[in-house]
Image (cartoon, grey):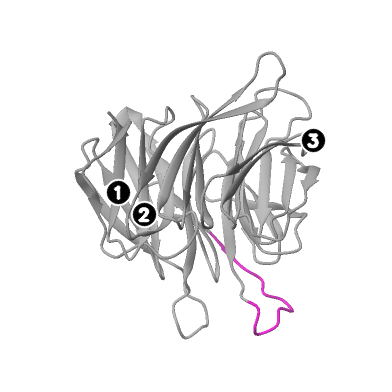
């Protein structure tokens, strides 16, 4: 069971965006960092275990030639082998910072090219794989950046074409030393999933077709793709083949966030129906099939949930953000 802990106050409420919460756990300093998007700015907060806020910082999207400040679409910490970078995406471009947000080390402007004036231009969907950071775009292309061990010499090394509509989310997991392993999955507004093998050149392994509803959030665990859809369903697929293993009618409304606690195989799903559910994933030793067990359900009344994340790799605590809610809600296992 989980109990409500002390909330962390925000300067403004979270924007009504899917996956609008990023969490970085720093066990060496016994700190947890939180990142939340609010319009043209992102709020970064550090908190001690008991929820006492220790520091706050606001980051703004780099402005271009427009009249109004560009809206931020996502903020996310990318844990690379040698460093941690904070990545911020907006309607103008992609900004990468040192992990505390103090120094911007890279800026990539989005090339709108021949886009019609009515087409929104933005980046969304952020994940790291090895020494690469992958970012999705409005056009369906995925930008792959090669990150050096230190310094600002970041290079756009590749653009991946697999989606015809806007990318919504990207998930990765360590390749664990296997050959031809599917270690990245990307999702889009049509519900299509693309499964990739990362490396010096990324390779498209399989495509999992959508079924008419968006897929706002995906996760990857031990070769299992967990995908949350706009109709409230969570579907579990075999990453290497695209085979559907499990289909869960998890929520009554659109799912806005999924997260995984990799050490224990716990999956968190949050949706616009005000519920957060926690599921336990496992593989049957006999058949190798994926099995799911419901562990916990939590209701946040009268709140449009827009972000939810585990606060540690063991899944013993999680945090939730909501639209028009000027605080981050925290829950920990009793």
**Screen quadrant of the C terminus:** top left
- Disc 3 crowd rating (10 Å Cα; few below 14, some 14-19, many 20+) is some
- What is the distance, in whole Å, between disc 2 and disc 3 at their CAs? 34 Å
User: Which structural element holds mark 3?
Assistant: loop
- At a point 69% along the width and 24% down the height, the residue shown is 289
Q: Are marks 1 and 2 in contact (CB under 8 Å)?
A: yes
Foreground of the two, 120 or 320: 320
- The residues tagged by marks 1 and 2 sit, at their Cα atoms, a distance apart of 6 Å
Q: Magenta span has 118?
A: yes
Which residue bears the numbered disc 2?
321
Q: Pointer 2: residues within 10 angstroms few (<14), some, or many (20+)?
A: many
Can see residue 142? Answer: yes
Question: As displayed, is residue 93 above or below residue 257?
Answer: below
Magenta-tinted stretch: 107-119
Q: Is residue 18 magenta?
A: no
- Dominant secondary structure (helix, strand or loop) of the stretch shown in magenta: loop
**Residue 136 location (% of width, % of height):** 64, 57
Rounded to the nearest angstrom, the CA distance separating label 1 from label 3 is 38 Å
Residue that appears at 25% across and 63% down: 11
Q: Characterize the local packing of mark 1: few (<14), some (14-19) or many (20 or more) Cα atoms within 10 angstroms.
A: many
Query: Measured from the top left, where is residue 150 in percent x and y?
Result: 51, 41
């Amino acid at each position: 069971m989980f109990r409500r802990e002390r909330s962390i106050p925000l300067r403004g409420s979270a924007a009504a965006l899917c996956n609008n919460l990023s969490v970085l756990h720093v066990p060496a300093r016994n700190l947890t960092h939180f990142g939340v998007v609010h319009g043209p700015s992102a709020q970064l907060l550090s908190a001690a275990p008991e929820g006492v806020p220790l520091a706050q910082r606001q980051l703004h999207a780099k402005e271009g030639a427009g009249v109004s400040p560009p809206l931020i679409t996502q903020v996310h910490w990318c844990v690379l082998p040698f460093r941690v970078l904070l990545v911020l995406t907006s309607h103008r471009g992609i900004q990468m910072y040192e992990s505390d947000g103090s120094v911007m080390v890279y800026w990539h402007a989005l090339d709108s090219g021949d886009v019609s004036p009515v087409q929104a231009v933005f980046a969304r969907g952020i994940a790291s794989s090895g020494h690469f950071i992958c970012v999705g775009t409005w056009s369906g292309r995925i930008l792959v950046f090669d990150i050096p061990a230190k310094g600002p010499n970041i290079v756009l090394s590749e653009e991946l074409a697999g989606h015809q509509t806007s990318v919504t989310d990207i998930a990765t997991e360590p390749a664990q030393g296997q050959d031809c392993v599917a270690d990245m999955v990307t999702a889009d507004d049509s519900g299509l999933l693309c499964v990739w093998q990362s490396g010096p050149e990324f390779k498209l392994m399989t495509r999992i077709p959508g079924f008419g509803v968006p897929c706002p959030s995906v996760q990857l665990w031990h070769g299992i793709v967990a995908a949350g859809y706009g109709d409230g369903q969570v579907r579990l697929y075999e990453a290497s083949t695209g085979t559907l293993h499990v289909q869960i009618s998890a929520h009554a409304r659109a799912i806005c966030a999924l997260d995984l606690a990799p050490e224990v195989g716990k999956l968190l799903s949050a949706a616009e129906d005000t519920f957060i559910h926690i599921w336990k994933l496992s593989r049957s030793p006999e058949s190798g099939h994926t099995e799911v067990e419901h562990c916990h359900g939590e209701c946040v009344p009268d709140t449009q949930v827009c972000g939810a994340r585990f606060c540690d790799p063991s899944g013993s605590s999680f945090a939730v953000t909501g639209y028009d809610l000027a605080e981050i809600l925290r829950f920990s296992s009793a």
